[in-house]
Amino acid sequence: MEQSKNVPIHILTQFDIPGTLHSVEELKRGHINRTYIGHWNVNGQRKRYIHQSVNHRVFTDIDALMGNLEIVTEALRKDLLERPVIPGETTLTLIRAKNGASYLRDEGGEHWRSFDYIENTVSYDVCPSTHVAREAAGILGRFQRALAKTPATSLKDTIPYFHHGLRRYDAFATSFREDRAGRAREAMAEIDFAQSRRELGGALISALEKGEIPLRVSHNDMKLNNVLYNSAGDTAVCLLDLDTAMAGTPLFDFGDLVRNTAVPCEEDEQDFSKVVVDMNLYQAICDGYLSEVGDMLTAKERSLLSVSPRVLALILGVRFLTDYLQGDTYFRIHRPRHNLERARTQFEIVRAMEKLDSEMAAYVGA
Ligand code: GN1
Ligand code: MG
């Protein structure tokens, strides 16, 4: 059997899949977990499944994580049964182990879980069209509507203070002060940029903590490549990566989606001539999103929509920069200075959005 390195086959075969495992290949995506495709022989046919090792240094309470996943997927499945569905629309389906457990731990302390593979789908790292952007915003809106009745407090915080801009700034200040990896000097321009925008970083969390906007379930990792499209690539059929779905604000998701979808380049693009906000993509996201949740949002939430992408880009940039200063302990990197480069790109997005402040606000009527 072909085998990816470090994959414990005897663990994967304990999942409740009625067949034999043929081979495993790594799916190289994501900065945190490791994801694999298992090719299985099931009743004489080849079938694919997803196997994932959850990063427990990042997700320290795996039971809480898996508990959330069950609540969220159940709410999404119920929603699919209750409304007219788009052909092919589906949600993640967890496969339990034969002993009923939702995940299994191997001897090395890694935690494994499995999902159905969703066949005949594609995803995008860079948004190719306004249609694709509108679809992503639509599936996000449907996710938030489906979870509107799930009390945000019924979900555990899988990563406490995840989009808490001010806490992210505190961690950044510490990393800068300690300068453990001796990298602060070469990152001075980025450090200055971040330091001058602390208030912006706290804009959404302050509104939440003051009770100006409601606490709601949010997805919290609303990247375009977490959306699966049908094989024609034109209809969003599934929203992936539910590990950070927990209490938050829809503004985290709208902001995250715009920062990575309306700026149609790689997240670590160093050619800044490509780091531009495409206002057509932005408008398509606004339209697709508001057509689903326009009547659900409060006036205050709506008024913060246009600033949220800037906040999310800033917080993510601060997180990349912090990780760089700490010696790259959190995000998986693919080259030296990768986290610094990622921070630079996010800060460039913040700059671009600052320049478009009034246009972005005018479009959502804020
Ligand atoms: C991480 O691993 P991935 O791609 O699902 C990160 C997100 C960031 C994203 C940036 C748990 O997500 O918060 O926005 O990288 N997830 C976690 O690409 O930190
Ligand atoms: Mg993720």
Image: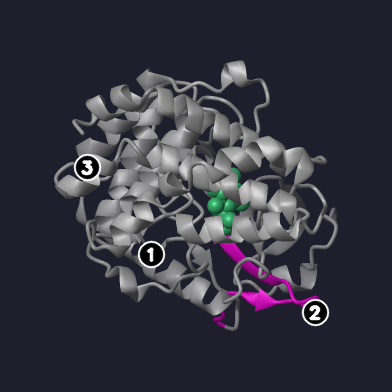
Q: Which residue is mark 2?
A: 107
Snapshot quadrant of residue 88? top left
The residue positioned 27% from the left and 70% from the top of the image is: 151
Q: Which residue is mark 1?
A: 72
The residue positioned 64% from the left and 34% from the top of the image is: 344
Compare marks 1 and 2 and give the one earlier in the sequence: 1
Q: Which residues are magenta?
A: 100-116
The residue positioned 39% from the left and 23% from the top of the image is: 281
| Rendered view: 289 above or below 53 | above
Compare marks 1 and 3 and give the one earlier in the sequence: 1
| Rendered view: 142 above or below 341 | below
Asked if one can make out residue 234 in the rendered structure from this viewpoint, the answer is: no
Q: Is residue 61 left or right of residue 242?
A: right
Snapshot quadrant of residue 209? bottom left
Q: Is mark 2 within 8 Å of ligand 1?
A: no
Residues at discs 1 and 2 in contact (Cβ within 8 Å): no
Q: Residue furthest bottom?
A: 99
Please identify the quadrant where the C terminus is shown. top left
Q: CA distance from mark 2 to mark 3?
A: 49 Å
User: Dot 3: what SS?
Assistant: helix
